[in-house]
Amino acid sequence: MKNAFHIMLIPTLGCPSKCSYCWSSEEGSPVMSIETVQEVINWLKDLQKNRITFTFHGGEPLLAGADFYRNALPLISNGLKDQNPEFAMQTNLWRMTPEIAKILAGYHVPIGSSIDGPEDINDSQRGDGYFSKTMAGYRIAKDNGLTVRFICTFTCESVKSREEIVDFFYRNRFVLKLHPALPSLRSENPKQWALDPEEYGDLLVYLLDKAIEHHGDMEIMNINDLCRCVFTRHGSVCTYVDCMGSTFAVGPDGTIYPCYRFVGMPEYAMGNVRDHPTPEDLARSGPGKLLARYKEYVDKECGKCSHIRYCRGGCPYNAIAPTGGEIKGVDPHCIAYKRIFDEINERLDREMFESSPMEMTGFQPGHGKRKKPGVMALMHKSVSDY
Ligand code: SF4
Ligand code: SF4
């Protein structure tokens, strides 16, 4: 299976929010010019013939303003029409206006936003007033026909309130996407908020149970992704595929990085869109070689792991950024990945052993009603919805 080609455009590294575990710059940080957007198009025209997905990321991408999107979206759509571009955006929604929402809706841009649970929990780690500003933007987005999903960052603090957080998402009918807080590379106390890998594994199993309990009326994206990985034996999100070569990020000044997580770290610059680097040029860059070495390392280190085909050593950023670019191990979340992949596989084996073929999909023949669903039902849904 070929990985989709994904470009993360970072219009600015600035952000008006001050989340405790984040690293974005001050508001007022430089914004990508429309000339740079045109250079991105010129670079990609020759580089990629297949479909391209663009995600506007940050920093806070809405700080680029309405004019940026009014110009950039048609420019990319027309300039790369052979590549059928699709768009998405990751934003805290604070600066959403009806004007920007209408522009984004015209290009069917799905929105990913961030809420860490009920207001008190969210604001305790994202700062006072965050929740109400995001919810105000959410209403504007919805009123103008945009779809919005929320990433919920679980920290070592908020994980203690996991029942309350999941209940909040369930009651509000929000799709939940879990993000584990990572050790901050720019903090004096990097592990202050980080979610320990063991706790992350426990949380994933807890969410698996919740996804089964609320099967049909709650969507937990990570659980769908993990079930799909196991079922198809191939990763379906970047963490579980070799992302190198199929994902790049472009910073505000046109610098190319392997992913948004590296943007602003000069040691991970692979080139600039103005120079139209070829895939070979990118592969020859320092970060290109480092990521190729990481891939070889995964082949060796994870070679005996039964999950290697659909895990691929996890996220290279998690593995190499905290060690200053040295490859000393695979993604430290390996413990969590093993735990949840083992759990899904064991439950799947049990369900297959105990059930008739009809029951495996959650359907009980003869009674006209559904049997209690299990991972097989989740797999069925996650594959058919994909
Ligand atoms: S470095 Fe990590 S977050 Fe970035 S694209 Fe690769 S797997 Fe995804
Ligand atoms: S679970 Fe761990 S050992 Fe297995 S492939 Fe993933 S990172 Fe490697």
Image (cartoon, grey):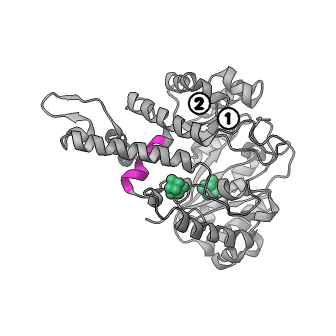
Residue 301 x %, y %: 55, 64
Residue 88 x %, y %: 60, 49
Q: Which residues are magenta?
A: 223-232
For the residue pair 154 and 33, the one nearer the viewer reads as 154
For the residue pair 76 and 271, the one nearer the viewer reads as 271
Q: Is residue 146 visible?
A: no
Residue 226 appears left or right of 296: left
Give the CA separation, mark 2 to mark 1.
8 Å
Write the residue at 68% across / 69% down: 290
Check whether the beta carbons of the residues at disc 2 and disc 1 lie within 8 A of each other: yes
Up the image or down, 298 lies above or below 279; here it is above
Q: Quadrant of residue 79?
A: bottom right
Q: Which residue is mark 1?
A: 98
**Amino acid under disc 2:** Asp
Residue 9 appears left or right of 340: right
* Quadrant holding the N terminus: bottom left
Up the image or down, 240 lies above or below 158; here it is below
Q: Which mark is residue 143?
A: 2
For the residue pair 22 and 135, the one nearer the viewer reads as 22
Q: Earlier in the sequence, mark 2 or mark 1?
A: 1
